[in-house]
Amino acid sequence: MSESTGNRFLEQLVRAFHVESTTIAVVILILICLVCVSVAVVLVLLINHCVKTRATAKKRKAFRKRLASVYLDEISEHEKTRGKYGQLLFSIHYQTKDSKLIVIVMQATFGESSSTGTFPDTYVTVKLASDKYGKLKQYGDPVRTELQRRKESPCWNYRCTFDVEKRDLKHTHVLFELFSYDTVSQDTSIGRLAIPLSKFDLGDYTDKTLEHAEWLQAGESKFNGIGEVYLALSYQKTLEVLECQVFEARNLKVTESMKALKHKLVNMHVELRCNQLSLGSFETRPKSDLVTPYFNERFNFKLNKDQLSDAKLTFQLQSCGKQGKKHILGSFAVGATMDMSGGGKHWAEMLENSPRSQAMWHTLVPKEV
């Protein structure tokens, strides 16, 4: 740039900025350039930050197992074939301030059992077990979700809360079991899942929620026992009376045992117990039919409302011989603390539907088992 050209440039700056000194005009020009560069740098940094934030969010979304129903719809048919018995989605959260373990049963899909296009009424039970002393042992009370009727992807969003000390978390296992509900018989286990909390990083679910999906294992096979007994229960709240009616038995497999004992008759012994104490017992009249005996007898027990949570009815199928000799062939129990798919289920439905009578088949467990 020549001297004359430089002078003309400076004169134009002076006129443009309406100042009297060329020095001031140059300073203003430099400041403007600095501001422009600063703005450009800020814009570049903002754009870079937005790009990184969006990329991070996409990664978290990809690796995070979402528990909304939409997630289950997104599972491809190829992925579904990985789990023959379906998939269960749940979350865990440990609250340190009150030592509470919160388990939320969210949703499930079915495996090959759903290939027929029909879906059962389902619920899930949740239990805790500990391996602290080398052997897995259940502790605390089991929890059951509400019933979901005939859904392809049943969604419960059921919250279960357990008292667990933080030092015991590494020994704790969460046991899930998916059941198909039966209105008149024992429910069928269609999938099970055991989750040791030690498989997760403690920091992932301490004072925060960890969501997880896992393929179910085969459900526990239904135990056929030596036959079944059909009975009805009802509780009259105003009278505080428990009514029990024993209708019949079916498919009894006791003939060989009866021959060995030289007994020819069978009957049912019914006893109400509460906290290891007997509150009364009855027996049906003996029957000679050893396959499908029909009893149809009703018994009443006095039972206070405050005893309902600890009481249970025990049923024993007995063989009857000469001179009053009797032998227990099989038994089962119905009560609040019994199996939630059998005796516990019947007891709960009796209380929910009081005073209407609730009938159900129960499996007789042989004495040797």
Image (cartoon, rainbow, N blue to C red):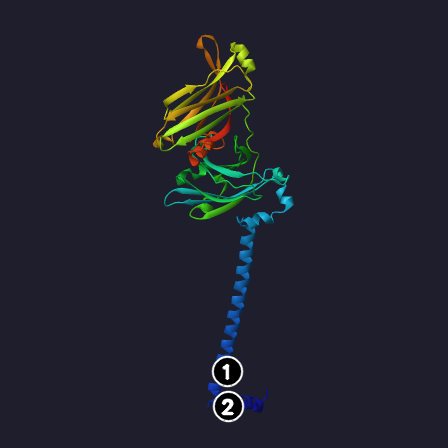
Q: Position of residue 136 (x, y in %)?
A: 47, 31
Q: Amino acid at mark 2?
A: Arg
Q: Disc 2 to disc 1, how far (Cα)?
A: 13 Å
The one of 194 and 326 positioned closer to us in this rendering:
326
The one of 279 and 219 positioned closer to us in this rendering:
279
Q: Amino acid at mark 1?
A: Leu
Q: Which residue is found at the position 54% from the left and 53% from the top?
A: 61
In the image, residue 264 above or below residue 22: above
- Dot 1 surroundings within 10 Å: few (below 14), some, or many (20 or more)? some
- Tags 2 and 1 touching, CB below 8 Å: no
Left or right of 100 on screen, residue 66 = right
Residue, disc 1: 29
The one of 169 and 230 positioned closer to us in this rendering:
230
Q: Which residue is found at the position 56% from the left and 56% from the top?
A: 58
State the quadrant of the N terminus: bottom right
**Residue 337 visible in rendering:** no
State which quadrant residue 283 falls in.
Answer: top left
Lower position in the chain sequence, tag 2 or tag 1: 2
Q: Position of residue 55 (x, y in %)?
A: 56, 58
Residue, disc 2: 15
Q: Position of residue 161 (x, y in %)?
A: 42, 41
Left or right of 355 on screen, residue 40 = right
Q: Position of residue 109 (x, y in %)?
A: 57, 42
**Residue 232 visible in rendering:** yes
